[in-house]
Amino acid sequence: MVRFLATKLLYLIPTFLGITLIAFGFVRVLPGDPVLLMAGERGITPERHAELAHQLGFDRPIWAQYFDFLTRLFHGDLGNSLVTKKPVLTEFFTLFPATLELALVAIILATVIGVPVGVLAAIKRGSWFDQMSMTTALVGFSMPIFWWGLLLIILFSSTLGWTPVSGRMGLLYFFKPVTGFMLIDSLLSGQKGAFASAVSHLILPSIVLATIPLAVIARQTRSAMLEVMGEDYVRTARAKGMPARRVVMVHALRNAMIPVITTIGLQIGVLMAGAILTETIFSWPGIGKWMVDAIGRRDYPVVQSGLLMIAVIVMAVNLLVDLTYGLINPRIRHK
Amino acid sequence: MALKKLAAIGAAAMLMCGTAAMPGFAKTFVYCSEASPEGFDPAPYTAGTTFDASAHPVFNRLVEFKPGTTEVEPGLAESWDVSEDGTVYTFHLRKGVKFQTIDGYTPTRTLDADDVVFSFVRQSDAANPWHGYLPGITYEYYDGMDLPKIVKSVEKVDDLTVKVTLNMANAPFLADLAMPFMSIVSKEYADTLQKEGRMADFNNIPVGTGPFKFVAYQKDAVIRYAKNPDYWGTAPKIDDLVFAITPDASVRLQKLKANECQLMPFPAPADLADIKADKNLKLDSQSGLNVAYLAYNTTVAPFDDVRVRKALNMAINKQAIIDAVFQGAGQVAKNPIPPTMWSYNDAVKDDAYDPAAAKKLLAEAGVKDLTMDIWAMPVQRPYMPNARRTAELMQADLAKVGVKANIVSYEWGEYLKKSTEKDRKGAVIMGWTGDNGDPDNFLAVLLSCQATGDGGSNRAQWCNKDFSDLITKARETSDEAERTKLYEQAQVVFKDQAPWDTIAHSTQYVPMRKDVTGFTMSPLGDFTFERVDITE
């Protein structure tokens, strides 16, 4: 197990370096120049442009800038935003808990609903439940997030008045963030009603963000279950008179979980992409919206470091998924 | 039953996030702002969003724009004298103006000349320790308004008197001082932060003399302010001001409808009819201090021939653009400055839409089978909702007079750069929103000889001696009546020479709850809440 982990971590080093190169290169390959965007319609003389580019270090050779980025990185310095002038790391950790909280709730929602629906659809293959749930999943998978979010807001917030339109917390509550997770901070604040407000603000964004992963997980679970249900050992278990519930829960589901867990792991990337739109619709102060703004303004330090941080998180989740396989299936337990 | 229960929970949740004023409670006003501020120090930034969150609620300036106008009135300076030659300004400061007291900082003295001198010097003097207090900090407005060239010195005469000497007479100078970047900051607060080794907090936790004091900011979520109990002006009627940062225009409207906020900026044009129909909302509107235009490159043939430019202007149906692209929220432009600006010359006659005359004029100029580029910017701006659509309409109009137009576009940064290139081909759709309400801020920035060349903002590359002389003279004249005459003449020269096709001045809308009173739209597009109230 330790050796497996060490090998995996060793593989991650070149991956990490590759990502630094991609993250650094990505924003510079995009046409556009942060100095020009700062000047706007007013225009900027070539002399002033050169002066500002020099001040920001953009006049140095590209390899020198990359080397600089790496050196700073290994000292734990991700640079300062060109727009806010604040350290990128500080901004990231201010905003990341909001994205993480939303993504966690969404993935839990998607798994808790998606897996049982998939299992049930597989067991009752061809039934009206199977057909309806899989059609709904197909619709969910193809749902344009922005439109879906707005639709929910108009129905549940504006028309029915059941949920707040956007934000993370009712504006009457005011407390300093401790963990950055609103569900926890609202409890810690001791303010009556704060937790309920945090929950009510999470409902619509987590439904919107969970929609696509939920559809994918349900469909994946169904097909994995169908495959396993046709295996010899399931037939044997049934033949020896094992109760149907036990056959499904112990023999079939456990084996079907391997591809499902892989799918759930892969959904982290989908969640990050979905977070960009979800955060914009629901004014959710997370890193998705932060990155989009930074790309729009060619805020090089934020884009390159933000991408890097997100990539590291996705890498960590994939490592965790690899480790989980062993827990589910002893045959691939890592020695 | 379950539905009822859910509705009850929903209602309770709404109550918790509701913000309407209740008797006995502090009166809170929520503004659904469109983006996060870049920071809270008004000097290094250029975005209106930043100024709405910093300069307007927290700070004051020596002089201020009178609400709803671009007229300058006394601010922290009670009065001022200008020397005969217009180069020396002596400001007499208001006595007893207190800076805000916040958690962890209590000022020990009131506003004095040191604060005013510091507010200038930190931007102008690279040797000042505060000049570079943030990494990569620049003072784009101070530089952009040419103040390094205009201002010679800023001196303290006594505690309440400051003398500013200019290198040359400059009539727009007072209006420059009313702009957000010239907000007066506290030197004592700066010294305290410097001593404590936390200079960056100057940009995070602002302290000013304005109507509201800063309380807290959560990036991309919310900014909180409280009424400044020591405010020198008329006390605000609301106790707490909250900016709920809501980037999407449709979501802002839904929040407004749900009374989660009471006022919002920049509604989507498609939502205007819905807003007008909502009995809980009202819609203020005002002609914006802006212009959208099509700039020909007057140094490149055949656009160096005024007849060609005039002919193309006559070929384009501007009213159709207003109807289709602006959806009626704008008016046809005939001058380079908007009609709400003083010195606007209403006597100027626009080149009327007349394809037949245009064709004739092109033939007269010897231009046949002309093929040209029309540049359409890739972004939406307050003065131009959809440049691509505008370009398509122009393309169709030009085809009718035998001109083949190709539409080109670039990424916004590239567009800004390439459109200023001296030998650029074709005509560029562009626009401008005024900074300080002075005609010089349009005419000199966009059409002066100094602004031609690579990187300049004169995208027509148009350098006309008569026009330049008139605006230079106007800048150096302090009498407004005299200046008005000069600018009126300049507009006649402009129309006669037609370096642009002036397209439109857009209308700006501000939707708010019906019970909101005291909000005045600013021609400069600022959002200020000093006089706002919610009727109960």
Image: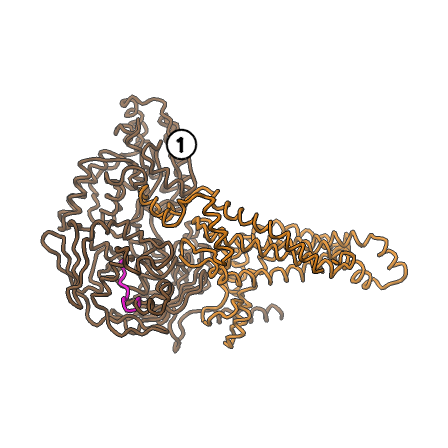
Q: Classify residue A124 by image quadrant.
A: bottom right
Q: Report the magenta residues as a range.
A: B182-190
Note the chain letter of the orange one: A
Q: Is residue B250 left or right of residue B106?
A: right
Tint of chain B? brown
Tell me the quadrant of the picture where the C terminus of chain A can be found.
bottom right
Neighbours of disc 1 within 10 Å: few (<14), some (14-19), many (20+):
some
Q: Which residue is mark 1?
A: B396
Q: State the scheme by which the image is colored.
A: by chain
Residue B405 locus on image (x, y percent): 39, 30
Residue beneath the point at 81% across and 54% down: A229
Q: Residue furthest right?
A: A240
Q: Classify residue A200 by image quadrant.
A: bottom right
* Amino acid at circle 1: Ala
For residue B515, say whether it is visible: no
Tell me the quadrant of the picture where the N terminus of chain A can be found.
bottom right
Label 1 SS:
helix
Could you say which is closer to the camera, residue A47 or residue A76? A76
Could you say which is closer to the camera, residue A186 or residue B343? A186
Which chain letter goes with mark 1? Answer: B
